[in-house]
Amino acid sequence: MTADIHSLVGAYVLDAVDDIERAAFDRHLRECEACRVETAELREAAGRLSDSTWSVPPPRLRESVLAAVATTRQVPVETPRRARRAYPSRWVAAAAAVVAAVGTGTAVFVVQEQRVRDQRVTAEAARTQEEQVRGILGAPDVVLRDQVLASGGKVTVAYSRLKDSGVILMAADSAPDGGRVYQLWTVRSGTPVSEGVLAVGQTSAVQIVHGVSAASAVGVSVEPAGGSPTPTQMVAAVKTI
């Protein structure tokens, strides 16, 4: 609910409040003459506006209006007499806010929906990774091997030949200096293959590796930001055969 209940007047008039907010504002109206005056005037203004602007409210108008309210500084409530004198400018401001919400509502909605989709994709990827890790660790033939990192910390490799997959779990004591990063590798047929590059400052990772039956070792190296095509400074090497 909005911290300053006086600022709900616009959303209340536009029916852009939820049931809890509506009940709270109804109680507030019984005690606040200024808000009663402003509510009546804005209802009249909204009625005039609706005659010539639109016949059907655009989708998600409530979300757009509340998003605009959350980022716009509210005008302090005035006494009934001052509120009535200020009506023309406040009517214009209210009308402009509604029209702006209609004009930009689609763009705001698209951005918000994209963020929701991105969060869902991230959450789904995390769930998928967790299920795969659980499957590998729960395999009847799972093998665990670990090694201390030369830079401090430890890397653990869990792999299953039955699932032909493994998990690299790395936890370093500190990040490489000079803006360098950790890079994960598998060695396949004598050739190092990159299995992921950590970000600058990142000290831990959980990386799933497929086709582990073809790998003879798992390594960790320190590389320039963005990684290298081949390892340059190895800090750990765990044999898997």
Image (cartoon, rainbow, N blue to C red):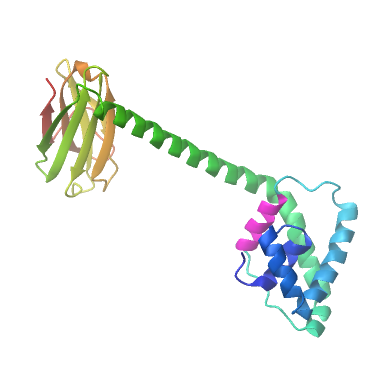
Q: For the C terminus, which image quadrant?
A: top left
What is the quadrant of the N terminus in the image? Answer: bottom right
Is 150 left or right of 180, judged from the image as shown?
left
Residue at image coords 22%, 20%: 212
Q: 104 or 6: which is nearer to us?
A: 6
Which image quadrant is residue 25 in? bottom right
139 versus 5 height, above or below = above
Task: Determine if residue 19 is in view.
Answer: yes
What's the magenta region?
61-70
Q: On screen, 32 above or below 207?
A: below
Magenta: main secondary structure = helix
Q: Going 79% across and 48% down the picture, which residue do you hit?
A: 57
Q: Position of residue 235 (x, y in %)?
A: 12, 37
Q: Could you tell me residue 173's position as x and y percent?
A: 16, 49
Please state the horizontal and vertical placement of residue 54, each as a whole percent of the image. Answer: 85, 49
In the foreground, 138 or 231: 138
Give the image location of residue 161, x and y in percent. 21, 18
- State which quadrant residue 135 falls in: top left
Vertical placement of 45 versus 218: above or below?
A: below
